[in-house]
Amino acid sequence: MKVLILEGSPRIKGNSSILCDEFERGAIESGCDVEKIHITRKKIGGCLGCDACQRNGGNCIQKDDMTEIKDKMIDADAIVLASPIYFYSMSSQLKALIDRTYAFYTKLESKTFYFIITCAAPDESYTKTMLDALHGFTCCVPNSIEGGTVIGTNSSNAGDVKQSKAMLEAYNMGKNIVNH
Ligand SMILES: Cc1cc2nc3c(=O)[nH]c(=O)nc-3n(C[C@H](O)[C@H](O)[C@H](O)COP(=O)(O)O)c2cc1C
């Protein structure tokens, strides 16, 4: 099973990345082939809304790192979308990536999506608006499955999430991935 982790925090060693590593550890133990990409290290322009991709078979006119990520997303069986909460929504880098799937999101049909979210807020109720945004994406992908969500709360500084029960939850979500 091929798993692609799209880690959307600009803090490369931050809380989102730490939870992604726990997920990855579990998934590898379950025999998955896992690739993790720090998307903030990639050049991904925002969607231009030109609709060229709708006329030309799904190819964006922007030639940037989304070309390689597109191929990896289409190739994956499961995709993890991870991001800190920024002003009650996802990071701009993850949002740009999601918007760029406008060119090919129908080709993600029937894949399983997992969400990993981190925030400074003390409880999960503060993550509703971000989850709504992520659901807004998956509900557009035909027959997509939401495999699970892990939320690391109380995590202001990089590394705070290590004290959280989200560490074990992320590991278990990765470990159980083959059961979906
Ligand atoms: C621009 C910005 C906006 C933020 N907005 C929120 C927010 O709305 N709610 C919240 O709980 N935390 C907010 N935070 C805190 C981050 O979500 C939190 O520190 C998270 O753990 C960072 O994850 P990372 O270490 O993976 O970068 C914000 C942080 C930044 C830098």
Image (cartoon, rainbow, N blue to C red):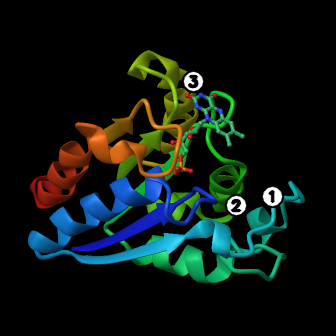
- Mark 3: give few (<14), some (14-19) or many (20+) Cα within 10 Å: some
Label 2 vs label 3, nearer the camera: 3
Q: Is residue 59 left or right of residue 147?
A: right
Residue at disc 2, CB closer than 8 Å to ligand 1: no
Would residue 84 appear left or right of 49 to someone viewing this image? Answer: left
SS class, disc 1: loop
Residue depth check, mark 3 versus mark 1: number of the one nearer the observer: 3
Give the distance between the C-alpha atoms of the residues marked 3 and 1, in whole angstroms.
22 Å
Element assignment for label 3:
helix
Give yes or no for contact between labels 2 and 1 (Cβ–Cβ under 8 Å): yes
What crowding class fits label 1: few (fewer than 14 Cα within 10 Å), some (14-19), or many (20 or more)?
some
Could you say whether the residue bearing mark 2 is in a helix, strand or loop? helix
Q: Residue at 16% across / 63% down in the picture?
A: 26
Q: Which residue is under mark 3?
A: 129
- Residue of label 2: 100
- Which residue is pictured at 60% across the width and 68% down the height? 39
